[in-house]
Amino acid sequence: MVTLNRIYTRTGDKGSTRLSTGEPVSKADLRVAAYGTVDETNACIGLCRLHTCSDSGGDPELDAMLARIQNDLFDLGADLSTPERGEPVKWEPLRVVASQVERLEREIDQINAALEPLNSFVLPGGSALAAHLHQARTVCRRAEREAVALASVEGEQVNPEAVKYLNRLSDLLFVASRRANANGAQDVLWVPGDNR
């Protein structure tokens, strides 16, 4: 259980922060950027849920998926904020596991089965929910790129399941955006060269 009884600490006033291991790092560190963008993805999904919650008459099934994903994204942030450096830590680090990725794959397949076939790329838009899901998708793709960049740094390791999770999540957010556009019937399609 996490206890937060003091919100400001002033420790970041000079541009540094601490990883979950207590190790001090710059706020510009690739690891901080990666888990920060995961947090940003989570905030975007929170906006999506304004449209899926039962209060809005939205999509309760999609809302439940997005709620689980928001919790998973905190797991992912914890994973990324705990470097694997071969040194023992005092607790069992929380890591994203294959079953979380597999659940996303099942949900993608479930959503995709009801969608109209695509014959062009989809432009972000259509319904408000679809537009917010596209925004979440693009932020998630940035988190994935940052995690991959971190993994390419010598001496750094990133849980491969964490990268897979981000990759699948962006796919889920794409098919969810099509679901939000009447299962693809109201998608806004790209027309190549249309405005020449």
Image (tube, helix red, strand yellow):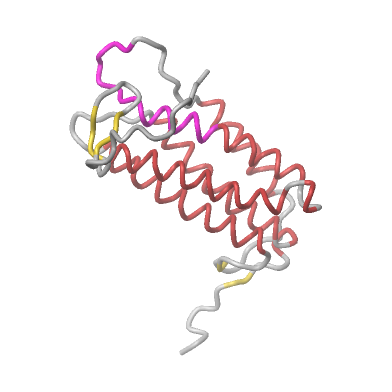
Q: Is residue 73 magenta?
A: yes
Q: Is the residue 124 above or below the residue 46 in the image?
A: below
Total label count? 0
* Quarter of the view holding residue 162: top left
* Quarter of the view holding residue 94: top left
Spot the residue most to the left: 154
Left or right of 137? Residue 125 is right
Q: Is the residue 11 above or below the residue 186 in the image?
A: above
Residue 87 appearing in the image: yes
Residue 29 appearing in the image: no
> Which residue shows up at 59% across the image and 55% down it?
133
Residue 122, image x and y in percent? 57, 66
Q: Which of 195 and 61 is in front in this view?
A: 61
Q: Which of 126 and 194 is in front in this view?
A: 126
Residue 84, image x and y in percent? 30, 22
> Which residue shows up at 66% across the image and 63% down it?
128
Left or right of 177? Residue 87 is left
Q: Does the magenta stretch include residue 45?
A: no
* Quarter of the view holding residue 102: top right
Q: Is the residue 88 above or below the residue 114 in the image?
A: above
Q: Is the residue 124 above or below the residue 165 in the image?
A: below
Q: Which of 187 and 140 is in front in this view?
A: 140
Left or right of 193? Residue 128 is right
Q: What stretch is highlighted in magenta?
A: 72-89
Residue 116, image x and y in percent? 71, 60
Spot the residue most to the bottom: 196
> Which residue shows up at 24% across the image and 42% down it?
15
